[in-house]
Image (cartoon, rainbow, N blue to C red):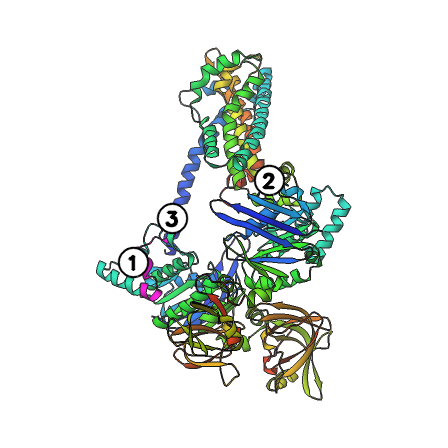
Amino acid sequence: MSQSNYRLIKTLLLIFLGIWLVFTLFPLYFMVITSLKPVEEINRMIPTFWPHTLKLSNYAGIFADPGSLKSLADSVIVSVANTALSLLLGTLAGYALARWIRGAAGENLAFWILSNRMFPPVAVIIPMFFLFDSMPWGTDSYFSLIVLYLVFNLPLATWLMMVFFRDAPRELEEAAYLDGFTPLRAFFRVTLPLVFPGMISVAMLCWIFAWNEYLFANLLTGTTVKTFPVHIPTFTLGSQSLWNLIMAFSLVAMLPPVILFVILRRYMVRGLSLGVVKG
Amino acid sequence: MARVTLTDLNKIYPARDRSVHAVKDLNLTVEDGEYVALLGPSGCGKTSTLRMIVGLEGITSGTIAFDGKRVNELTPEQRNVAMAFETYALYPNFTVAENLAFPLEVRGLGKAERGREVARIAKLLRIESILEQKPAQLSGGQQQRVSLGRALIRDPAAFILDEVMSHLDAHLKFKMLFELKRIHRSLGKTTIYVTHDQVEALALADRIAVMSNAVLQQYGTRDDLYHRPVNRFVADFIGEPPTNFFAGEIAEDQEGVALRVDGSGLAFRPDASRTAALQQRGARQVTIGIRPQNFSTIASPGLQTVSARVVLNEYLGEQSIVTLEAGGTTFRALASPDLELSHGAPISLYYRSSDVMVFDPESETFIG
Amino acid sequence: MARLELQHVCKGYDRPILDRLSLTVEEGEFFVIVGPSGIGKTTLLRCIAGLEVVDAGRVIFGGRDVTRVPPYRRNAAMTFESYALYPHMTVFENIASPLRARRMDEASVRKAVLEVARLLRIEQLLDRRPHEVSGGQKQRTALGRTLVAKPDVYLLDEPISHLDAKIRHELRRQFHTLQELRRVATVYVTHDYAEALSLGDRIGVMGDGGLVQVGSSREIFERPNSIFVARHLGQPSINEVPCRLSRDGGALTLRSLEGSLSFAMNGSQRTILEKVRGDVLVGIRPQHIHVANGGSTRQIDNARVEAFEALGATGVLIAETGGVSLTVLTSPEENFEPGQPVRLGFDVEQFLYFDAVHGRNLKA
């Protein structure tokens, strides 16, 4: 290929990327400016894309409501507890599936575990409600949400961890046995560090699901426990939605995942490519 | 068929922090019908050179010419070179015959003609019996032959063979060496063979280009590389078991010039024809090199001698490698497997003074 | 310190890999197992290490039956073909691993690791990760990890096969000089016969199902018990000439089935073949044929050069005589052109004779 052709393709590619970037970043931009607009400016027929006045009072406004902080705290409790449980159980189950359950039975078992994630959540919403209602801790509790989210996160965690464990060379574990480590010690000393980047990825995926989940949280909880997605629709004035407050609160709620992702990005990329590049 | 000429060839891979100079000012001519090996350790630039010749890689500067005609701007198809790869790269869903015929089919040859060509190549490579099989049913050696056959079936300007034997086991490799040589003899086509294995290069090639650190070190026949290496790198890289090197200095005694090895009683006598060159040097320090196979345990007239003690005798069937020690310096010699040499036994070794190589210790170039 | 015993060990998946294999490796012995790839050498090592459970038979370390003992309680140290270094640990921690398993105190760990590192000349690498060191250095780290453990049995799986020739020579010498390896029973697996001959106090040649022959390097190279063993050892491979015995009066002659090559049998050769019925496979090592120029060998034949290649320290000549193609080892300095006539001298005393049907050595 000649030099000029190459340059043309490169330029076209850059233009395309620029358009794509504008497309994907616009919603975020609109969120940010809406969160800074005064209430008079938010409900215009033709929205202002370059707001006339910008003020931070919306942020002060949302934290004046004690329910806001409480809902964020609830979300943290539910999502962190659920992630920890998913990761713990998923890692152990994934290891068992990768190393100890061999042959067709293991393959089938692994598939059916993952199939748990395939049905539409709405299909089980009613039975779930009655099921949790009959439990001693009831529906409106931290525990109910933590356990309920396991239904979705545990299969994912198990499946992904199984893949990561399969890719971790078995010989390293065997070398550890020959060094004199019992299987349990070898697991913690050699195998677990090998899949650590994978565990970070799995934790991120589970945590983001639990952090943002609305459907079940809205149905089961709402009084004693109220996660932030359930809290968002409460920013209203009569029949009018206060978009400026909603956007400000949403942006605050977005911060933890973004910060975590920036910090853990290095591990996530390594974890997700663990199966592709070995050694 | 073509004569391949590389003139002032350079390849630089640009990178943000530090660009890599993979091939530096390479000048090389492969005569029409010649079999040339590009030999060097991994990362020496031989693969980049090969990729530039084939046209898979751009040229930073310099020219590549086939029969005097510049081909820098031509695509691989236009250059008309055939290449066989390290990984055989056979089409798994085709039979051997279909694999062989594929390059002809691409060029639009008729069915009858294709059949004739496939039969001719199959006969040459002795793979007539497996023509209807799929690659997966073949052994490694057979797959390698089919891969060669696919390169040979067209009538290209040059053949490029890239590490084609590195996946074969030792016995098979040995057989293939003779096969490749026979095929080259019967076709007489320009062939460039890239390898890191000196045995393959020495056995097959008319001339060998030894590369290291992006630079061509020496280009010559097996004899040149063995007896007249241009520097210590070539002397060290060519030869198995590895060449013995000693740090020493030039001394003179009543018998003439001697090369004394530092810190030991060892002294080697260089060939009379080289003494003048050695004496003219200002510095007395030299690096002495001698190959293990140039030592003999049998005395005969005209041979020089050194004495040492046996440290280790490795019996290898056809031969033994004896590790010796003299005044704290250890070195190796090849010996007959019938010799029973035990640890600590004193031994006299004989060598021809013409086999002693002398290098400059600083620049590592060959002195004489 | 212990000797290693295997008694009637069986192991198989869809076909038997080890079939009633018995073997004793004495304390301090360096035992090398050599065989073609895929024959089950690694499986044997894994059975000794306890990574595979044997189907039948017993594994005994110094009188202690460890057949049902898991690997981490066997006290065997093994190097893997892939080295199996822990990528997330430094070279120091890799070597220290067996000592950490025993919960040894930090000062002793430090001392032991440094001692081994010094011995293997990798002191300067201790802080690096495995991906930051070269192949030869990885190999030494893996070896260090086994040495530091002071085990009852050393198991080494193709430790130097993947390194280039120069480093192989150096590490081979290291295996010779490491006293630690000569203190306990060592089993070393390789597919390279030169490595086996060089290193083994005794060598076991592995074929289908188990060890075909066990003996010293000279025994297995010079007196192979079967054509399988003779074929596997030696580069270039042994010449195989199927022959028929003919007796004319008092004379005993071997004639090749194809072509017209013949050898007159005298003295010791005669006594071996006297009682043999049927065909004989004659094995002639390439170094037992030379290009004759006068010479003192028994028999000389006219031949024609087919091919010649000068390798490193040797030259290989393929020459045809009496319709039989033979490989001959020569000096690399000579030169032969195809078609050129040469005279071949045969060391008839060195010939090997095998049963044409079963491949058994008739001398043994």
Where is residue A134 shown, x and y percent of the image?
53, 11
Q: Nearer the viewer, residue B17 or C35?
A: C35
Q: CA distance from mark 2 to mark 3?
A: 45 Å
Is disc 3 surrounded by few (<14), some (14 to 19) or many (20+) residues within 10 Å?
few
Rounded to the nearest angstrom, the CA distance separating label 1 from label 2 is 49 Å
Query: Could you tell me which residue is drawn at 53 percent across and 83 percent down?
Result: C296
- Provide residue A194's location: percent of width, then percent of height: 58, 41
Assign a secondary structure to mark 2: helix
- What are the residue bounds of the magenta stretch? B122-136
Q: Which residue is mark 1?
A: B101
Tell me, yes or no, whether the highlighted magenta stretch contains residue C128.
no
Q: What's the residue type where badge 2 is placed?
A: Thr
Q: Which residue is mark 2?
A: A191
The chain carrying label 1 is B
Do marks 2 and 3 share a subunit?
yes
Residue designated by label 3: A9
Q: Quadrant of residue A77 in the image?
A: top right
